[in-house]
Amino acid sequence: MKLTILGCYAATPRTFTNPTSQVLEIKNRLFLIDCGEGTQVQLRKNKIKFSKINHIFISHLHGDHFFGLVGLVSTFSLLNRTTDLHIYGPEGVKDIILLQLKLSNAWTNYGLFFHELKSLDSEIVYEDDKVIVKTIPLKHRVYTNGFLFEEKVGERKLNVAAVQQHKIETCYYQNIKNGKDITLDDGAIIPNTALTFDPDATKSYAFCSDTIYHEAIIPLIKNVDVLYHESTFLQSEEALAKKTFHSTAQEAALIAQKATVKKLILGHYSTRYDSISSFKAEAESIFSSILLADDGKTFEF
Amino acid sequence: MKLTILGCYAATPRTFTNPTSQVLEIKNRLFLIDCGEGTQVQLRKNKIKFSKINHIFISHLHGDHFFGLVGLVSTFSLLNRTTDLHIYGPEGVKDIILLQLKLSNAWTNYGLFFHELKSLDSEIVYEDDKVIVKTIPLKHRVYTNGFLFEEKVGERKLNVAAVQQHKIETCYYQNIKNGKDITLDDGAIIPNTALTFDPDATKSYAFCSDTIYHEAIIPLIKNVDVLYHESTFLQSEEALAKKTFHSTAQEAALIAQKATVKKLILGHYSTRYDSISSFKAEAESIFSSILLADDGKTFEF
């Protein structure tokens, strides 16, 4: 899994900081999460191939999370894209994009599919043979979802020495990888665990932005490998965080601790702070494994 | 008059080039013309005060000319703007902006006024005591206007020596500046021309983008000081220019020549060209006073 932060600052784009957008590479799939203004330029700067993006997840309809979407959709057309594009986001995102395409008389030359979300419960929004994506209902000023990306458990791994020792024919291998026991010609049953190793450990990533401190998400993100949780403010601005339905670095750390995640990445910093190092210091008083997102930074797990 | 080019490249924003947007400073007013994605960052980079922009003119609803508008409107809110903002653009621009503000539950805290355009004839869209702005109907794939910015003729200038010589009382000065002749107590009439000098010469700027070669605009931009005319293509791509309702550098120069403008600024270059110098070379074969727009460049006249 590789996470590229295209932008992780709150509110307005500035000369050297960008609003929220990130790319998650998982099992050779690229998922774009949020799409603030300027995302297409950030994709170019970070040398991410436009053609590899087929699924875009939008957390909520505040401008710093989606104002770059219509430009990206249009640019895909100009680049003669033909592959389908799927957009997952709150109800209304379709109207916004289609109205602009209609008025510019510029329909896409590729299939554009909207999966509009309105459920207040977690739901599966994407699934293929290797990856599953679920929503994480968040609590913000408008309808908002985080997203949980999970690798599916793969097949069990063949213990080649063991199957050869038992002279098992290759036509049974797939059954064995699927977890079946094997009955030999002499009637002896070889348990699957004697013929296989555990599959690779699966990885999971949870994106949670924007949200007030909200313990209801804890069961949904329990034990994830990496949690990105917004920390718009420091604890000194706790009242402002509550008022605007945002979290502080300390609150993000508390969520990480209670959900026993492996790593916490902080982001969505208010532009009022000169430096982001205070976010790490504050969060580390609660939770030890803290990373700071920053524009252009990549994380591999 | 000072023109700042925030962006002057066609189609998609790239790492080092921006879609159309420019700021015209005229008689201490700042007018923003078009607002492609990333305009607010370009305004910051070029150190243009957000608070001085009260009027935004949108030529047409292709993304590279207005996708940055909603972000700018939102940022004005975040900056606690209270001054009215006026947006002049094609019918539909209001729906686009309001739908997005509605869905993000983020109405502006300042007066936001839309002046939607649909006339196929030139019309006055803005006027105050010193400046007048008229549309220049262009011919493109969607409804498009250029804009003509003209300084109004000021008062005549008092010839102080002459009025003193005739012992004219100061209460008559305003009448004299307004062009009136003066009758002295002895009945002698002093013609205004003997008491005044001509007012400062007025300046005018015409923005014409996007458009196919379109001679109907010539009477509207006749003798302007500066014409910005799109030149998306070189003459080698003439067929493509016709097909996409754009102009070549040569065609822009021909319009400049026929309208006997003083200076022509070329812009809206297709990103297919590695260098923009060929645009100047091509246009100079027709018209001598050619300038090349480029992002971040300023022109003072």
Image (spheres, coloured by chain):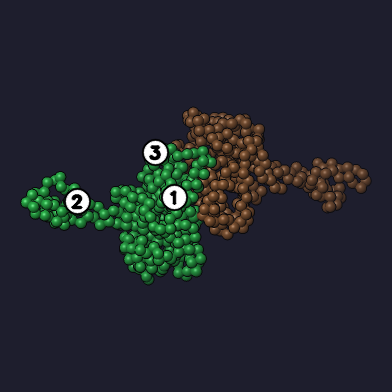
Chain colours: A brown, B green
- For marks 1 and 2, the one nearer the N-term is 1
Kindly indicate the quadrant of the structure image that contains residue B119. Answer: bottom left
Q: Secondary structure at mark 1?
A: strand
* Residue B79, percent from left and from top: 42, 39
* Residue A8, percent from left and from top: 52, 42
Q: Nearer the viewer, residue A144 or A171?
A: A144
Q: Nearer the viewer, residue B102 or B186?
A: B186
Q: Residues within 10 Å of mark 3 (few under 14, many from 20)?
A: some
Q: Residue at x 47, y 57 (%)?
A: B143
Amino acid under label 3?
Thr
Co-location on one chain, circles 2 and 3? yes
Residue bearing mark 2 = B177
Is label 2 or label 3 in front? 2
- For marks 1 and 3, the one nearer the N-term is 3
Q: Is residue B45 visible?
A: no
Q: CA distance from mark 1 to mark 2?
A: 37 Å
* Residue B261, percent from left and from top: 33, 64
Residue bearing mark 3 = B82
Q: Residue at x 39, y 42 (%)?
A: B84
